[in-house]
Image: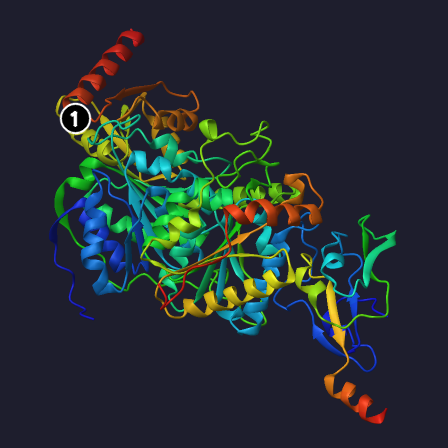
Amino acid sequence: MFEDRKMETMTAPAGMELVYRRPSTLVDTPMHYCPGCSHGVVHRLIMEVVEETGIQEKTIGVAPVGCSVFAYNYLDVDMQEAPHGRATAVATGIKRVHPDKIVFTYQGDGDLAAIGTGETIHTVNRGESIVVVFINNAIYGMTGGQMAPTTLLGMVTSTTPFGREQPVMGYPLKITELIAHLPGAYFVTRQAVHTTAHVRKAKKALQAAFEYQGHNKGTCFLEFVSNCPSGWKMTPLEANDWLEKNMLPMYPLGDLKVPGRN
Amino acid sequence: MIKGTIHVSIDICKGCELCIAACPQESLALSEQINKKGYRYAVLIKDNCTGCVNCALVCPDAVITVYREPKSAKKREAVEA
Amino acid sequence: MSHKPEQPRLMKGNEALAESALRAGIHAYFGYPITPQSEILEYLTEHGRQYGCVVLQAESEIAAINMIYGAGGAGGRVMTSSSSPGISLMQEGLSYMACAEIPCLVVNVNRGGPGLGTIQPAQGDYFQATKGGGHGDYRLIVLAPSSVQEMADFVFEGFRLAEKYRNPAFILTDGALGQMMEKVILPPAGSLPHPEKPWATVGKPKHRERNILTSLHIESEKMEKVNHRLQEKYTALQREARHEAFQTDDAEVLLVAYGLSARICQKAMELAREKGIRAGVLRPITLYPFPSKAVAGAAEQASNVLVVELNSGQMIEDVKLAVNGRRPVHFKGRMGGIIISPEEVLAEIEHIVEHTQVEHV
């Protein structure tokens, strides 16, 4: 019945109507991510928000270094690819010359919370009115599964083969809690996308963040506790289960800072 | 019950099974065949889909399109019955 | 706008450069304090507002260059400045910008190195500026002013070239030119047109393909293609090579020097001529593209070439390539922030002449 996946050419079966399709703002090309990877879900949610709020023409994205370095291949908006860790500095530059545009960064834990910690903190501290999307899967995926700043104690990675040991490698960095303390942060939340209920909440958070950007009152910072089936050496289902049992106790979900509430 | 169905973009699906776990009706399974990339892909195996969208929401590759009977059609059916 | 000709002013090099940047219509400047260039940041923070220019003190030189990358990529006319150690921190960003072909202007008020070095003037960053500086095969367009007037003028010239070739431009100056005060006539505001930038990331209208600025081309065939395109651009750039010649027509000793050293060499040339030695000076104005033909032509008629730099001998390599073994190429330099005196250069000229005469006997 459906030879072509392109929405325009797809027709609803007799007696039925379309209730969900991928957003038109997500480029119609297969993504390079591993099966079950959270990146794809977060990409799609961002682009759903961009489509539904009609901001495609004024949105500019910044891609990081890491697995999502190719985000610009999938997100149908103008984009720049930043050096490792510098996405928020690049976004600062864009936003400062185009204060009327919607600017967001998309970064992983290594990019945002290790090599780019300085840029992350100072960008939020300046209260740059941008959206920062932070994917925390506690590992370096692109380079083959090395320890990240957010790697849990005891977690095995290719550079913590005996598990992350605090005396050697320190503690997992809860950078989102750190960010929430900065006066320049306007909206700070931690979400996940491993179940339908979490996906629905995550989308609401993204909708709020993109809307808040128009307030020009500070940075909207969204952490997504994510999986990395390949890096964690698990099936996608095992990874989501492991995330629920191990990541969420360390990185509890919810809003850390909400406009008008804190 | 409202009747729905889905369309899966077979060649884009990576067979991660997240949709299968998310389906409250247990309507989904992996195919016996493999797609161009060598993955078994998600298929509807039962006729009980309600078009709840859960599968599409968790799909990392945005391969699922969801259709559903309009609610008004359902009502009409009930009246006619 | 007034059409009265601009009156000469007495200004510091750094301040003349900063004022000129505002008159060049920069949209944004991102910088970080470092001696001996902090006046540029200070001047712009004070005066930028009147021009509607975004001026931001970044948390580091790394952040500053990446803000430039963002703002320049988004179509802004953008500038940053620093001094040697800070310029080292900017190299990664410059490499990305060269590959993504984002025009901008970067100013290096060179101080003595290596390492933290000294805050005194030097020319030790020639290699870094002209050979790429960061990783990969790329070049910057490098201009070397030798007066406060040129500190102001080359801002316009830098942006003109950067935007024409979609490539970062670079002003390589030094702590002496940045700090000294001289008479300067500033270029009029608004006289540098803003070209169209259809490639900029400004938000994608419905019916245009999205603009992507990246330096990542993971397939080798594509990456090689990008490299070929860059190399073709650098070849085309060669026509922009500029130099200035002083009494080179009859020179038996050809001095080659840029920036501050060129001024010292002019004085040394005068002293030599007073003593009956026909010296001449060739001053490369663009260090990349290097005015090789001009150097080769001037060397042709001299019996010796003397390169003078405030380093251990860096530009001499380009001079030797240009001269290609046809004449002996000598070197005189000072390091560590010490400015060579005209007398030291004269002594070297005299030594060369004596040595040559002995050889001829």
Q: Is residue A66 above or below residue A79?
A: above
Horizontal and vertical percent position of residue A248: 55, 49
In the rendered structure, the answer to whether residue C298 lies left or right of residue C139 reads: left
Q: Amino acid at mark 1?
A: Arg
Q: Nearer the viewer, residue C206 or A210?
A: A210
Residue A14 seen: yes
Q: Which residue occupies 24% across, 43% down?
A: C33
Which quadrant of the structure image shows residue A183? Answer: bottom left
Q: Quadrant of the N terminus of chain A?
A: bottom right
Q: Is residue C210 left or right of residue C355?
A: right
Give residue A231's position: percent from left, percent from top: 63, 39
| Of C220 and A203, the residue lying toward us | A203
Return the x and y of residue B61 as percentages of the image width and height.
69, 57
Q: Which residue is mark 1?
A: C273
Q: Secondary structure at mark 1?
A: helix
Image height of C346 relative to A16, above or below: above
The answer to which quarter of the image holds residue A129 is bottom left
- List the single residue furthest toward the left: C10
